[in-house]
Image (cartoon, helix red, strand yellow):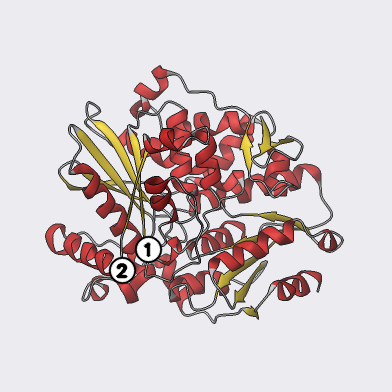
């Protein structure tokens, strides 16, 4: 499989080079040259396959022959070491829980898969120079990447996160692991962190000091494995006669874009729903046809505090940069903090279901969509465990939650971070 830059001003590369480079020299995101649908027989019989078998069929064309079959299957086995249940909430609505992994966030799969791919390439090539994984996070990405790469030989991880704009649990998962993980606490917003990372990849002055790659969802090895979720959810649905839609709380738009890859592979998905907070660049685009990135606004659903979503260009590519094609496959809704809090309360009081603000927004968007949809069932994605957002849950709910073992392991460890305020602070660290 070859990958090309969506800016169309860089050479095609292999899967290995797309993973190691992270971003193309022209600052474009890499995209697979082709997407071949899976067989109808396979799709129609998903319940006869294990999650590992499904994941292998989904990902193998994107890896090609660059990782042998047995090694790729081993990477998948080590990646998918937890469950992905669809929990029924009410008639025609279920919650796909993606928080049962090591850092209790949906990004565990991409983080673990990428770490193992990079580890495989390093071991195969016997590199004598460490690779530095440089990643920006608005909340959960950093913890998932830190956990996935912790202790991996030949790889150092540097995580940039916006000071004061991640939850206490998220911050501990970034800053308390030590070993080959370093956290840089940025005086700014997530978009500032993301811009610094993109700039660093193309900074010629850094090349003599570091071999850099990214572990944000801009990296194909982080982004593409998220397609697994939609196959795992579809497999669990009992009634396949109804139209199926997925509601995805969205920030950088990598997860919902991976769902669209699943759709291109042949999975029977009628369309997608994106729920955002007040950072509503994409819902506004669907309304007006004008794509206008905005400065980030801080909210209680901080992982979606993104004013310039990187992965949206991939979504546009999947729809031939045609806004009408996109509108036929994607509906967008946005909600305030007050509406998200009310939804958390509704889910708890009526269904005894504890949601955090991102999942609550996914639920709200799905409810809105279903008001005018017939013969349709929907799944909203619950992307993180509520324990990661204890201070913003519906009043009285936090006291009912027992700390999971994954959180107990880090919550009392000391925070260790390096504060920076601008790009020079990042380059000074990387050159040190």
Of the 4 image quadrants, the one containing the N terminus is: top right
Q: Is residue 354 left or right of residue 301?
A: left
Task: For the C terminus, give its image quadrant.
Answer: bottom right
Reading the image, the residue beneath label 1 is 278
First in sequence: mark 2 or mark 1?
A: 1
- At horizontal 47% and vertical 23% (from top left) the residue drawn is 38
Image point (42%, 61%), residue name: 279
Q: x, y (%) of residue 233?
A: 34, 39
230 relative to 365, above or below: above
Q: CA distance from mark 2 to mark 1?
A: 8 Å
User: 291 or 148, which lies in front?
Assistant: 291
Residue at 28% across, 51% down: 365
Q: Is residue 74 left or right of residue 390?
A: right
Helix, strand, or loop for circle 1? loop
Query: What numbered label is drawn on residue 337?
Result: 2
Q: Foreground residue, 297 or 76?
A: 297
Task: Please say whether residue 9 is visible from this viewpoint.
Answer: yes
| Tag in front: 2 or 1 | 1
Furthest residue in direction left, as rendered: 350
Element on which disc 2 rests: helix
Q: Are the residues tagged 2 and 1 within 8 Å (C-beta)?
A: yes
* Residue projecting furthest to the right: 208
Residue 294 x %, y %: 49, 62
Nearest the camera: 120 or 25? 25
* Residue depicted at 56% across the width and 64% down the height: 191
User: Is there any visible trace of residue 83 in the rendered image?
Assistant: no
User: To which quarter of the image does residue 86 belong?
Assistant: top left
Q: Position of residue 102 (x, y in %)?
A: 47, 59
Q: Position of residue 338 (x, y in %)?
A: 26, 69
The disc at residue 302 is none
Does 409 sit above or below residue 49? Answer: below
Local packing at callout 1 (Cα closer than 10 Å; few below 14, some 14-19, many 20+) is: many
């Amino acid at each position: 499989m070859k990958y090309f830059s969506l800016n169309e001003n860089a050479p095609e590369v292999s899967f290995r080079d797309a993973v190691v480079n992270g971003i193309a020299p022209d600052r474009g995101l890499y995209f697979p040259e082709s997407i071949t649908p899976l067989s109808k027989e396979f799709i129609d019989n998903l319940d006869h396959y294990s999650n590992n078998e499904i994941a292998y069929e989904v990902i193998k064309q994107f890896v090609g022959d660059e990782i042998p079959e047995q090694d790729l299957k081993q990477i998948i086995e080590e990646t998918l070491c937890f469950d992905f249940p669809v929990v029924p909430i009410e008639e025609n609505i279920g919650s796909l829980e993606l928080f049962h992994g090591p850092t209790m966030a949906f990004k565990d799969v991409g983080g673990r898969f990428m770490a193992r791919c990079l580890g495989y390439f390093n071991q195969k090539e016997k590199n004598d120079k460490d690779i530095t994984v440089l990643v920006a996070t608005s909340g959960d990405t950093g913890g998932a990447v830190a956990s996935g790469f912790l202790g991996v030989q030949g790889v150092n991880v540097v995580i940039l996160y916006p000071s004061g704009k991640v939850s206490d649990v998220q911050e501990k998962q970034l800053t308390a692991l030590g070993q080959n993980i370093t956290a840089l606490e940025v005086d700014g917003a997530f978009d500032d962190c993301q811009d610094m990372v993109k700039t660093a990849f193309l900074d010629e002055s850094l090349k003599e000091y570091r071999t850099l790659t990214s572990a944000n969802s801009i990296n194909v090895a982080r982004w593409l494995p998220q397609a697994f979720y939609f196959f795992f959810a579809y497999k669990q649905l009992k009634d396949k006669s109804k139209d199926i839609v997925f509601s995805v709380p969205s920030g950088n738009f990598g997860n919902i874009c991976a769902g669209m890859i699943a759709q291109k592979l042949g999975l029977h998905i009628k369309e997608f729903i994106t729920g955002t907070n007040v950072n509503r660049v994409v819902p506004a685009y669907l309304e007006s046809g004008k794509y206008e990135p905005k400065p980030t606004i801080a909210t209680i659903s901080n992982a979606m505090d993104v004013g310039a979503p990187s992965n949206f260009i991939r979504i546009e590519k999947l729809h031939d940069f045609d806004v009408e094609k996109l509108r036929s496959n994607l509906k967008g809704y946005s909600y305030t903090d007050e509406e998200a809090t009310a939804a958390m309360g509704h889910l708890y009081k009526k269904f005894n279901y504890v949601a955090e603000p991102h999942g609550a927004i996914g639920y709200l968007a799905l409810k809105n969509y279903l008001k005018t949809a017939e013969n349709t069932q929907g799944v909203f994605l619950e992307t993180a465990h509520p324990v990661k957002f204890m201070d913003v849950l519906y009043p009285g709910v936090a006291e009912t939650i027992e700390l999971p073992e994954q959180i107990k392991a880090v919550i009392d460890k000391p925070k260790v971070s390096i504060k920076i305020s601008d790009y020079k602070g990042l380059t000074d660290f990387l050159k040190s």
